[in-house]
Amino acid sequence: MGPLTLHRRFRPWRYSISHSTLLLHAHADSGYDEHLNVLFEDVRAVKLRPFYEPRPT
């Protein structure tokens, strides 16, 4: 699997070492009508940041 590109600002919402999961959350704002959650499973390691900005294209 290649890199995943998300075009919204996300922040870590929940990280569970025992369940090997990472949940990222993006709030609804003026550009988006809905909240968005992305769940990663079988997470082996992660470098957590306060938030993740989309990369410019």
Image (cartoon, rainbow, N blue to C red):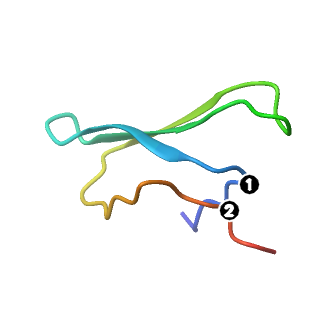
Image quadrant occupied by the N terminus:
bottom right
The residue depicted at 34 percent of the width and 58 percent of the height is 48
Mark 1: amino acid: His
Q: Earlier in the sequence, mark 2 or mark 1?
A: 1
Where does label 1 land, which residue? 7
The residue depicted at 66 percent of the width and 27 percent of the height is 35
Q: Residue furthest right?
A: 31
Point out residue 54 in the picture as x, y percentages from the top left corner: 68, 62
Q: Residue furthest top?
A: 34
Which corner quadrant of the image does residue 12 belong to? top left
Using residue 50 as the reference point, say whether residue 52 is left or right of it. Answer: right
| Disc 1: CA contacts within 10 A as few (<14), some (14-19) or many (>=20) | few
Mark 2 secondary-structure assignment:
loop
Mark 2: amino acid: Pro
The one nearer the camera, 23 or 32, is 32
Mark 1 secondary-structure assignment:
loop
Vertical relation: 25 (above or below) 6: above
The residue depicted at 58 percent of the width and 68 percent of the height is 2
Point out residue 23 in the picture as x, y percentages from the top left corner: 42, 37
Which disc is residue 24 wearing? none
Vertical relation: 57 (above or below) 32: below
Q: Residue furthest left?
A: 18
Q: Do the residues under discs 2 and 1 have CB atoms within 8 angstroms?
A: yes
Where does label 2 land, which residue? 54
Which corner quadrant of the image does residue 26 belong to? top right
The CA span between labels 2 and 1 is: 5 Å
